[in-house]
Image (tube, grey):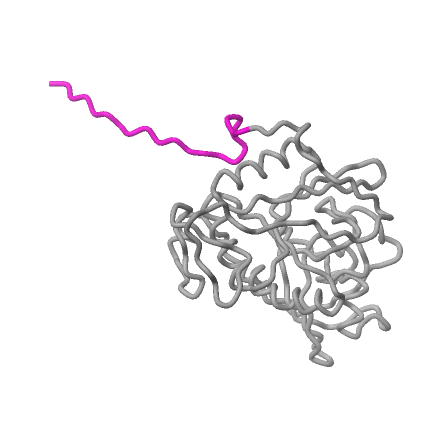
Amino acid sequence: MNKIISLPLILVLSSCSSNQVKTSEASIQIPFISQQASISSPNVSLTLPTETKAQVRHHSIIELSRRSLPFVNPTQKDESLYQEGFLPRVVKYIKKGIASWYGPGFHGRKTATGEIFDMYEMTAAHKTLPIPSYAQVTNLENNKTVVVRINDRGPYVGNRLLDLSYAAAKKLGIQQEGTGKVEIKAITPLQALPHIQRTAESQHKKVYLQVGSFGSQRKAIRLQDKIAAHNLPEPTILASTHRKNTTYKVQMGPIKSSENAEKLSYQLARIGVKDHQFVTETRQN
């Protein structure tokens, strides 16, 4: 006797699906910012279109709706988010070795991420750590510590583990010698955020959550539409042109508190947007 077993159909939604809601490119006004342009903060509102709002402490840049995605308390680490692949686990990397720095010869050139290298930003190059990711670097000679964003590959000289930007090397006190013995520890974006915010405040800059960077305007608009379709704050698309190449950055913010940044990160992770990073205002955005 033959039995017919019906299997449930599972529909998997992908961020690169061709069935997403499309926005007319003509209706999107994207500011083109040249490399020489002055810093201009995007006018971004992080208020969700909702009738029921939840206030976070004394102020909030994110207002949550009961109709929106399930809320995750950032003080309670939900292991299911990691098990189901919502959030990538931080790479367990702690290593001691030699760090060097690079600056004038590479300033203004493209990094492995496609962004323009700025020797005055807190960044670094590493051979194997994920791009983008963050690392805490400690000078073992003077115990000075900085947090850098890994946005490039290298160094490929001798036994060096890390190539720091000039700014990071100067804060660690190794810019004069050129190299120094350091400890490198991989950390999460949310662990890096307080350090990024302090640096930004000292420079009178703002911090943004960058959820994507594309060479295609259409791909940037698709990601913008996907996020907005889930009752999340609509990102802003910024375009920067360098040597005739245009990069479209999808950013949300400015970010004003670690608590709200964590809630937003969890909400984005639940819809499959996991590769985001915190960036400060530069000539590129």
Q: 111 above or below 137?
A: above
Q: Position of residue 15 (x, y in %)?
A: 52, 36
Q: Position of residue 205 (x, y in %)?
A: 73, 61
Q: Main secondary structure of the magenta part?
A: loop
Total labels: the figure holds 0
Front residue of 175 and 96: 175
Name which quarter of the figure residue 164 lies in.
bottom right
Q: Which residues are magenta?
A: 1-21
The answer to whether residue 243 is left or right of residue 26 is right
The residue positioned 77% from the left and 72% from the top of the image is 171
The residue positioned 70% from the left and 67% from the top of the image is 201
Residue farthest toward the top in the current orientation of the protein: 1
Residue farthest toward the front in the current orientation of the protein: 51
The answer to whether residue 94 is left or right of residue 177 is left
Q: 185 above or below 210?
A: below
The residue positioned 74% from the left and 70% from the top of the image is 202
Q: Position of residue 83 (x, y in %)?
A: 40, 51
Based on the picture, tell me whether residue 15 belongs to the magenta stretch: yes
The answer to whether residue 171 is left or right of residue 147 is right
Q: Position of residue 24 (x, y in %)?
A: 63, 27
Image quarter of the N terminus: top left
Residue farthest toward the left in the current orientation of the protein: 1
The residue positioned 46% from the left and 61% from the top of the image is 55
Name which quarter of the figure residue 100 lies in.
bottom right
Based on the picture, tell me whether residue 190 belongs to the magenta stretch: no
